[in-house]
Amino acid sequence: MGLLDEDRLFPLDGRARDVARDLYAGIRDLPIVSPHGHTDPRWFAEDRPFPDPAQLFVTPDHYVFRMLASQGVALTDLGVPRMDGGPTATDGRAIWRLFASHYHLFAGTPSRLWLDHSFQHVFGIDRRLSADSADWYYDRIADCLARPEFRPRALFKRFNIEVIATTEAATDDLRWHRMIRESGWDGRVVTAYRPDGVVDPEMAGFADNVALLGQQTGFDTATWAGYLDAHRARRAFFQDHGATSSDHGHASARTEDLPQADAAALFQKALRGACTPDEADAFRGQMLTEMARMSLEDGLVLQIHPGARRNHSDPVMAIHGRDKGFDIPGRTDYVAALRPLLNAVGMRPDLTVILFTLDETAYSRELAPLAGVYPCLRLGPPWWFHDSPEGMRRFREMTTETAGFFNTVGFNDDTRAFCSIPARHDVARRVDCGFLATLVATGRLHADEAPALAHELTYGLAKKAYKL
């Protein structure tokens, strides 16, 4: 008896379920295209064994430790590092026991599906995780991790990953990507250009980051023209390391298209640390439009990930730093916010701008109508808090009627948790097959159209949108 139901996530209706099974059988084994994520390229460069089960599944995964934190478990007890280098748990078995004793908290969540899928399909486990089975689990997984077939490169092949994109800061030296390339390994791991640290005046160290950008490129980043040229140079450097996209995690979707003299003056205020919050947001918005213009020059796909209210807990931010599970979704405007960028470049079919959201109320009201008319726009898949079976269904239900399927970009897993990648893609494949099956069963889609659409949603749309 496995951990997973073979018909999970398929429709309950008999006819639709049969159609979903058939569609899924046709696409379940397609290669994984993972065009946006946060796995560590160092894993693939060095190909060292993962240290222990806790460091593989618990300590680096904010989906996991935020749930435990919500029930009063201290992040330090889960091994999450402190900013000051202070004491935190290091005993992997103790961390795992703590995780296992709280595993019931994940009932009904996508994390439970991902974890159980990893336990069953990666490590061959058919027993449920609990306090009683914690040590058995730990020993089983630890034994596997010591074997060559569980090293990162071997798992990459086993997971049938065709290509995976990591995400690096604009000033990253990309040493691990260079090491991968020079090693001669045939796994395809590419980077993505993430310039938040050099376009967000409110980010700590902004001016220093801009200065470093200048040192790396030889351009005078104390000037607006030199700053833009430095971005062009770094984008080219990233493209040399496989990048096909840039990624922008802004607080809002605001864009601007200011006269260049005004943009230059705003840039100088940003360098001095003199921007008001509104001016900082305007500068980020200006840079989205500048990046769109650069994409017309160099072909990089532009991804916009707005709406996360980052680091909501000041105490957690002070102790543990950024990206520790306390980013919260917020309301996000797209219609007015994107208009300056769209007026500038929105009718260009040779530009691809992929929009993500944490505000589901925008799907049918704003995002689908926008992507359903502007040639440059595509809708990214359900993201983060909505990367779930119900979130995926809502996305298809709320966007397909207006934007169709071909103004979307398939699925990306957006994860740091390596073993969850096949699990997340499997969930998306099952949900999409279920949605298509429902369309067939209700007379809205011809049965002979559905297999080709399932292939596109699983594989084709992502490769095309991300130029992979």
Image (tube, helix red, strand yellow):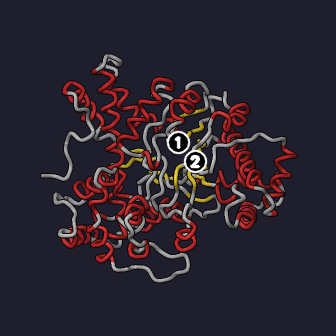
Residue 39 visible (yes or no)? yes
Counting from the top left corner in percent of width and height, residue 1 is at 12, 52
In primary-sequence order, the first of circles 2 and 1 is 2
* Residue holding disc 2: 307
Which of 289/434 is in front? 434
Label pair 2/1, CB-CB below 8 angstroms: yes
Seen at 33% across and 37% down, the residue is 431
* Residue holding disc 1: 359
- Dividing the picture into quarters, in which one does residue 338 lie? top right
Counting from the top left corner in percent of width and height, residue 92 is at 33, 76
Residue 239 visible (yes or no)? no
Q: Distance of mark 2 from mark 1, alpha carbons?
A: 7 Å
In the rendered structure, the answer to whether residue 2 lies left or right of residue 317 reads left
- Dividing the picture into quarters, in which one does residue 198 lie? bottom right
Seen at 49% across and 35% down, the residue is 464
Seen at 30% across and 77% down, the residue is 94
